[in-house]
Image: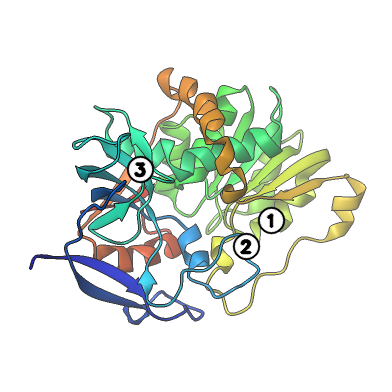
Amino acid sequence: MSTFTAINLVARPAPGPIGAELFEVVQKPMPSAGPGQILVKQTHMSLDPAMVGWMSPDPESYIPPVGLGEVMRSSGIGEVIASNHPDFAVGERVMGMTGWTEYLVSTGEGLRKVQAGLDPEMVLSVFALPGLTATQGLFGFGHPKAGETIVVSGAAGSVGSIVGQLAKAEGLNVIGVAGSDEKCDWIVSDLGFDGAINYKTDDIDTKLTELAPKGVDIYFENTGGPIQHHVIEHMNAHGRAVVCGMISDYTAETPSAGPNWIPIIKKRITIQGFAMPDHFGQLPELIDKLTPYVMQGKIKHRAHVLNGLESAIEGLNMLLTGANKGKLIVKL
């Protein structure tokens, strides 16, 4: 009997790097599609910072943790290779929560079709979780207005790079924070950001004074860490802080301290945390909002592609260290 490969989560992460001992690579019998089901062969799998949180046992998280012994959760794109479902034909491509597996059987719930001819790397970089998260966070909570200034942390990442480009298209002054000179150059030279801060080498306060002389109106937070404290001090009255991610704290032994609340009170700053599962019902509207920017050439992306299912294990660490350059994707 033929088999396929899947990777199960078998232990919870401890502080520090993600180790291979948290996962088990397993061989499973090749499934078949039952009544009302489809069989999907996954071709491209997305690696996202949120996955580190999904591995945590935290019962109060916005989404239930991946169960031990279960296939590791992720999103991806695949091809329908067998169908007993009237809405899905063999040869069509679908995307959704697929998991770390070469094949999966689905009723079609939670899957949406991928338009023929679209590059799968572009789809996962722009129209999957990164682009939808960026669109919801910026427009749903940031309320951008032309002429304002936005600071985006993790600006060279999959979400931050799109947030900055959307904000630039809306006429904002866009400042990105990244962890290398190469990434800072990319977001300015290629993506059109107005300025960049290398948080590892620059004096953050001095750079903010230089790049945001009129203060900061929106802070889009993806990473956590000391940049928060500086940005809050530079924010204008009635500024908005949109908290999307805290990747620097996901595997930290001691979470970093948050900003002082006195300037938050004085400046009446709104701080909004959000998670995309709350907004999955809005996906059609978010796609409609994002698509014109893409069609007009206002959204660029780059993908960092790993090969083979098992490369996902070490790939997670690249997200934590910032070693990836662009949207991290596994090609199966």
Mark 3 in CB contact with mark 1 (< 8 angstroms): no
Residue 185 rendering spot, x and y as whole percentages: 43, 40
- Which image quadrant: the C terminus? bottom left
Q: How far is mark 1 from mark 2, CA to CA? A: 6 Å
Q: Quadrant for residue 282, please give it.
A: top right
Q: Is residue 156 visible?
A: no
Q: In the picture provided, is 19 more to the left or to the right than 284?
A: left
Please tell me whether mark 2 sits on a helix, a strand or a loop. loop
Please tell me whether mark 1 sits on a helix, a strand or a loop. helix
Q: Is residue 322 above or below residue 214?
A: below
Q: How far is mark 2 from mark 3, CA to CA? A: 33 Å
Residue 295 rendering spot, x and y as whole percentages: 41, 19
Mark 2 — residue? 225
Mark 1 — residue? 228
Which three-letter amino acid code belongs to the residue tagged 1? Gln
Q: In the picture provided, is 92 more to the left or to the right than 125?
A: left
Q: Is residue 166 above or below residue 235?
A: above
Residue 161 rendering spot, x and y as whole percentages: 48, 40
Q: Quadrant for residue 120, please give it.
A: top left
Residue 318 rendering spot, x and y as whole percentages: 37, 62
Are there few (<14), some (14-19), or many (20+) residues within 10 Å of tag 3? Answer: many
Q: Name the residue: 43% across, 55% down.
A: 48
Which residue is more in the foreground, 181 or 62? 62
Q: Name the residue: 35% across, 43% down.
A: 95
Mark 3 — residue? 95
- Which image quadrant: the N terminus? bottom left
Which three-letter amino acid code belongs to the residue tagged 2? Gly
Which residue is more in the foreground, 260 or 303? 303
Q: Is residue 283 above or below residue 20?
A: above
Q: Residue furthest right?
A: 266
Which three-letter amino acid code belongs to the residue tagged 3? Met
